[in-house]
Image (cartoon, rainbow, N blue to C red):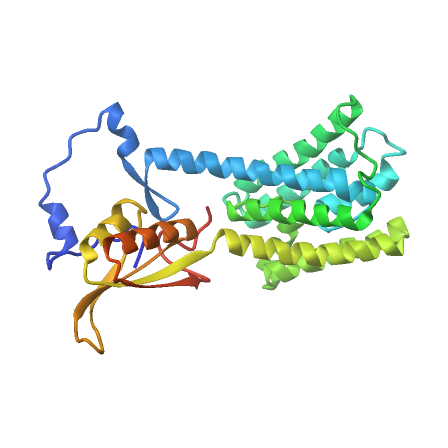
Amino acid sequence: MTDNELPVTDGENTEEREKNLPAAEPATEAETDKKTVVYGEKVLTVKQRRIRTALRWLLINLGALMMAASVYFFQAPNEFTLGGVGGLSIMLSKGITPLVPWLTQAVIMGIINVVLLIIGFILLGRKSMLRTIVTTIAYTFEIWLFEFLDLIGLISGGTTLTNQPFLELVYAILLFGVGGALIFNCGSSSGGTDIIALILKKFTKINVGFALMIVDLIILCCSFFVFKDVQTGLYSFMGLFAKSFLLDSVIESIGKTKYITIITSNPAEIADYILNVINHSYTVYDAEGGYTGERKKVLVTVCKRGEALKLKTKVKTVDPSAFVIITDANEILGKGFGGTF
């Protein structure tokens, strides 16, 4: 079953039917948005593609803003180091900024990211880096923006907000983890140590998650020597592991889908709803009740959680006696699924 699979209602081959169709006339401008295009292995109209692209970039920028807020308002004032270029820039700014004022945390982060992006371009290739470049620029720019707003007095940064380190660590983890998950789910990354992890994977075959953990742990261990504060270091260790688990959990939750099996004696209207309302396809096969011997149809489909709720409601409206089984689908590979947002 695939997302753009055509249902077979008779024995005629789909390709043969398409060959017998008359040639389509050129579309007018009013019809342009109704054209279908292949996008991320899923057939979408041009309008749907534009909406999806706009939403993706909105989520990427929201994720970058959340990560920047975590670094500037919670990590830096408390000297928490949750790994990544953000944590490295916090450490470096501790010693460099007092000597060279213009080398602020945002500037240091920008320099490190530029170097890593150049290395990534050389070793990983252009295709895998373009979206990461935009995300990295947004992430670094937003930290610089916070610094500028602080400089002109519109916000207050550089000091703790609550004087409660544990509470601020929680918010640092939440903002950083959820923001990173939004970015990863959109097929991008914040650059920095992610690039190092991808390079290690390419040349050593180490798993990306494990490689990223190694790099972040090295940065975290260095923070003990820079800040010379055991309590802050222990907070950072706890934050790093909590961030990793939160990141994985949010990514899995965002992409979670439902596997739905519908046993019904009225399949036509349900099948039409699956195809034309929630825009998925389905697999259908014959079944026979073990007790009653009654002949029924079984429809199987996969969709997002919100779509599953709509489909369940529709099935109960169309066929109250239908038997519906809904389970979580942990991983799906195929057209329309298995890709990024």
Q: Which residue is at a point 40% across and 58% down the rendered structure image? A: 258
The residue nearer to you, when weighing 127 against 185, is 185
At a point 52% along the width and 54% down the height, the residue shown is 253
Q: Residue 16: image x %, image y %?
A: 12, 51
Whether 294 is drawn above or below 243: the answer is: below
Using the rendered image of the protein, determine whether residue 30 is visible from the camera's viewpoint. yes
* Residue 193 image offset from top left, x and y in percent: 67, 50
Above or below 6: residue 163 = above
Location of residue 118 by image quarter: top right
Q: Nearer the viewer, residue 108 or 94?
A: 94
Q: Please say if 235 is above or below 73.
A: below
**Residue 89 visible here:** no
For the residue pair 316 and 44, the one nearer the viewer reads as 316
Left/right placement of residue 91 relative to residue 277 reads: right
Give the image location of residue 284, x and y in percent: 23, 62
Position of residue 248 in the picture relative to residue 327 (left or right): right
217 or 180: which is nearer to us?
180
Q: In which quarter of the image is the N terminus?
A: bottom left
Q: Residue 135 appears in which quarter of the rendering?
A: top right
